[in-house]
Image: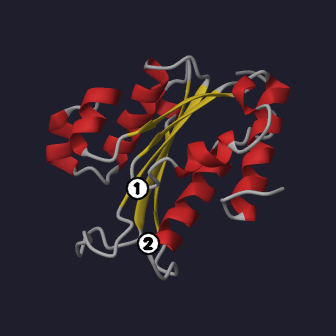
Amino acid sequence: MDSLLPAELVGLAARVIAANAALGRTVAVAESCTGGLVAAALTEIAGSSAVFDRGFVTYSNAAKIDMLGVSEDLIDCFGAVSVAVAWSMAQGALARSNADIAVAITGVAGPDGGTAQKPVGTVVFACARRGQDQADAQAETQLFDEARDRAGVRRQAALVALELLLPNAGDGAP
């Protein structure tokens, strides 16, 4: 298949579309450091319109607040690259879409912007499902310190986000 995107991204996106289509489940993404890369990978797949509801590229803090309803207080208290903000982004994407599942990505792609607490390559992911109990929230922080550059961090983050959109074993309902 001819694509502008790396084959591994497109291949994984194809799995996400097929698996979610089989369940009749729709997805949304809320992206910051990946800048729409996950949405681009999903829409690279023919038939993705049956699964992909929408994507939010909320690169700035203002966009996170305006488009997803992330609390300014959360950003001020924990920083934009935090579990709290990623979880709020995922919840906001669900609330502002028709999707059954949403994944959020926020991080420090570099080469600048890192700190001792959040070095370049730090990326936070959150996954939320419609009707999910808050106690079952899924969020994680990963450090892609093996990625040598901005493109590498973004590519690795997009791959993790796509993995989070794959149905879990026994996940038979939206």
How crowded is the residue under tag 2: few (<14 C-alpha within 10 Å), some, or many (20+)?
A: some
**What number is the disc on residue 33?**
1
Numbered disc 2: secondary structure: helix
Numbered disc 1: secondary structure: loop
Q: CA distance from mark 2 to mark 1?
A: 10 Å
- Of the 4 image quadrants, the one containing the N terminus is bottom right
106 vs 63: above or below? below
Q: Residue at x 57, y 65 (%)?
A: 156
Report x, y in % for residue 126.
48, 43
Q: Residue at x 26, y 46 (%)?
A: 60
**What number is the disc on residue 150?**
2
Report x, y in % for residue 93.
45, 28
152 vs 57: above or below? below
**In screen coordinates, is 69 left or right of 42?**
left
Residue nearest the observer in this picture, 1 or 71: 1
Q: Is residue 69 visible?
A: no
How crowded is the residue under tag 1: few (<14 C-alpha within 10 Å), some, or many (20+)?
A: many
The residue type indicated by label 1 comes to: Cys
The residue type indicated by label 2 comes to: Arg
Q: Is residue 53 visible?
A: yes
**In screen coordinates, is 103 left or right of 3?**
left
88 vs 115: above or below? above
In this picture the colour scheme is secondary structure
Q: Considering only order in the chain, which callout, 1 or 2, is on the residue closer to the N terminus?
A: 1
Q: Residue at x 43, y 72 (%)?
A: 150
**In screen coordinates, is 56 left or right of 11?**
left
